[in-house]
Image (tube, rainbow, N blue to C red):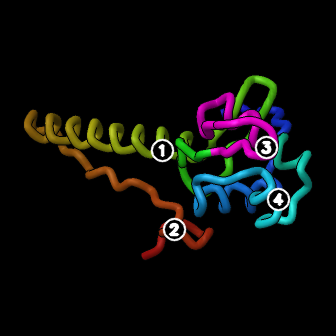
Amino acid sequence: MPKRALAGAPSDARDKMWRAMRMQPAFRVQELIGLCGVRRKAAEKFLLPLVRAGYLRAEGAGPARRYMLIRDTGSVPPRAGRSGVFDVNEAIARDRARYVELIKEVRQIEERLIAYGAYVEKFQPHHPEETNGNGPRA
């Protein structure tokens, strides 16, 4: 996927706020500020795109306004950009699902080739954790 220019590049403040939202899914801005030690402007700048994108629901107005986390997609905070919100958690989930589909398809092809009497060396998927930088582990 091509790199996108995101206004919300990773930051410690966003990480803290996202973790706090996941632990306490209903909160007020003031509570988030107190828990995370961030400025109101930073908190509001992070919350507004999440409301627009359907991650949070806002109820009430002013200081009494409460936010509820309604779409917790994982540990990495979503990032806001000009074209909306990018969520690496969802991208990872999509890629993992596609990976599983492709492996199943490869296995089916191998079985058909074996049924035809063709020699097939079984495909062994590469897992990054199985390498030490010098190729696959023995």
Q: Read off the residue under disc 4.
A: 33
Q: Amino acid at mark 3?
A: Phe
Query: Which one is earlier in the sequence, the residue at label 1 or at label 4?
Result: 4
Q: Read off the residue under disc 3.
A: 46
**Which is in the foreground here, disc 1 or disc 3?**
3
Q: Read off the residue under disc 1.
A: 93
- Residue 62 magenta-drawn? yes
Looking at the image, which residue is at 76% across and 66% down? Answer: 35
Looking at the image, which residue is at 59% across and 63% down? Answer: 23
In this figure, what is the number of numbered marks? 4
Q: Amino acid at mark 1?
A: Ala
Looking at the image, which residue is at 76% across and 58% down? Answer: 32
Q: CA distance from mark 1 to mark 4?
A: 30 Å
Q: Amino acid at mark 4?
A: Ile
Which residues make up the magenta segment?
A: 46-67
* Residue toward you, 12 or 43: 43
- Up-down: is 59 above or below 9? above
Q: Amino acid at mark 2?
A: Glu
Could one spot residue 3 in this view of the protein? no
> In the drawing, does residue 8 fall left or right of residue 135?
right
Looking at the image, which residue is at 66% across and 53% down? Answer: 27
Q: CA distance from mark 2 to mark 1?
A: 18 Å
Q: Read off the residue under disc 2.
A: 129
Mark 1 element type = helix
Binning the other alpha carbons within 10 Å of mark 1 as few (below 14), some (14 to 19) or many (20 upward) gives: few
